[in-house]
Image (cartoon, helix red, strand yellow):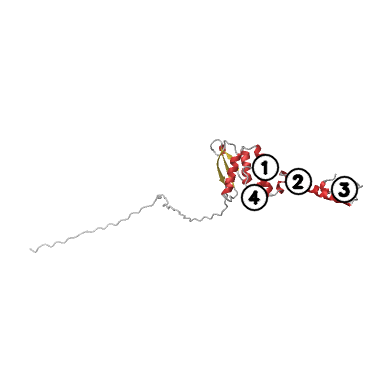
Amino acid sequence: MLELKDNSLQKILPSSIASYKTVQDIAKAISAKLQLINRQTELILLLPRLDELSEALIDELAWQYHVDFYDYQADIEKKRTLVRNAIAWHRYKGTPAAVEEVCTAVFRTARVFEWFQYDGEPYHFQVRLIEEGVPDEKVIDNLERAIQVTKNTRSWLDGLSFYRELMATIYMAKAMWVHKSVHIHPSEFTIPAIHANIYVGNAVRQQRRVTLCQTGAD
């Protein structure tokens, strides 16, 4: 089967006129226009070729698909994600899953926590665990706007929370004082029984006193 991209018009010319130069020139001119049309028909396939389209065309598609929270200042990859998921989001708009997908299109780590997961009030929810850096306040404003147009009317956003895991080396110093108490008690002992022979000796001194008395010469 011949296709337009194969310059097929020259190949299907009748043999009776194929040798005429005028006919060949007309066939070449028409073939060039047909090939141009063939290349432009690829533009009809927009979503399958989203990664190949220019940023200007992505912006136009965002308007066509009613991406209400579209950020024209976002990078091209985020724009493509928003446009690619626009139709699906409109199908289940108002559900927690739709809100979470919108949040992850802006911050891929965002997660939706419903009120019963953090002991909140009924019909309230939070968006937590956002780890990416925030370049400016406009990004937060756009995210909040995206949440407001995606959630159902009765639900209320309690707030956004950001998660940061900081890696650091902690050095600790301390002084130690050791005190040791030593208690010394005299040892207990029992006085032994002493058995001995006792020898007692004594000396007796006897003295006799002689008194001489002188009598008178009468």
Residues at marks 2 and 3 touching, judged by CB atoms closer than 8 Å: no
Which part of the image, by quadrant, shows the N terminus? top right
Q: How crowded is mark 2: few (under 14 residues within 10 Å), some or many (20 or more)?
A: few
Furthest residue in direction bottom, as rendered: 217
- Viewer-proximal residue, 209 or 9? 9
Q: Is residue 198 above or below residue 119?
A: below
Mark closer to the chain start, 4 or 2 = 2
Q: In this view, does 177 lie to the left or right of 165?
A: left
Determine the CA span between mark 2 and mark 3.
24 Å
Is 86 left, or right, of 179 in this rendering? right
Where residue 201 sits in the image (x, y, percent)?
A: 32, 55
Residue at point 63%, 39% (across, down): 98
- 84 and 26: which is toward the camera: 26
Label 2, on which residue? 42
Question: Helix, strand, or loop for circle 4?
Answer: loop
In three-dimensional space, the C-alpha distance between marks 4 and 3, rounded to whole angstroms, equals 47 Å
Indicate which label's residue lies in the foreground, 4 or 2. Answer: 2
- Kindly identify which numbered label has been placed on residue 11: 3
Give the residue pinned by disc 1: 64
For the residues labelled 4 and 3, say whether their Cβ atoms are less than 8 Å apart.
no
Mark 4 vs mark 2, CA separation in Å: 25 Å
Q: Between marks 2 and 1, how big is the CA–CA gap?
A: 18 Å
**Amino acid type at image mark 3:** Lys
Query: Which residue type carries mark 1?
Result: Gln
Disc sitting over residue 75 in the figure:
4
Depth check, mark 4 against mark 1: the one in front is 1
Q: Which of marks 1 and 3 is nearer the N terminus?
A: 3
First-in-chain label (2 vs 1): 2
Q: Which amino acid does label 4 sit on?
A: Asp
Q: Is mark 2 on a helix, strand or loop?
A: helix
Q: Which is more foreground, mark 4 or mark 3?
A: 3
The crowding category of the residue bearing disc 4, from other C-alpha atoms within 10 Å (few below 14, some 14 to 19, many at least 20), is few
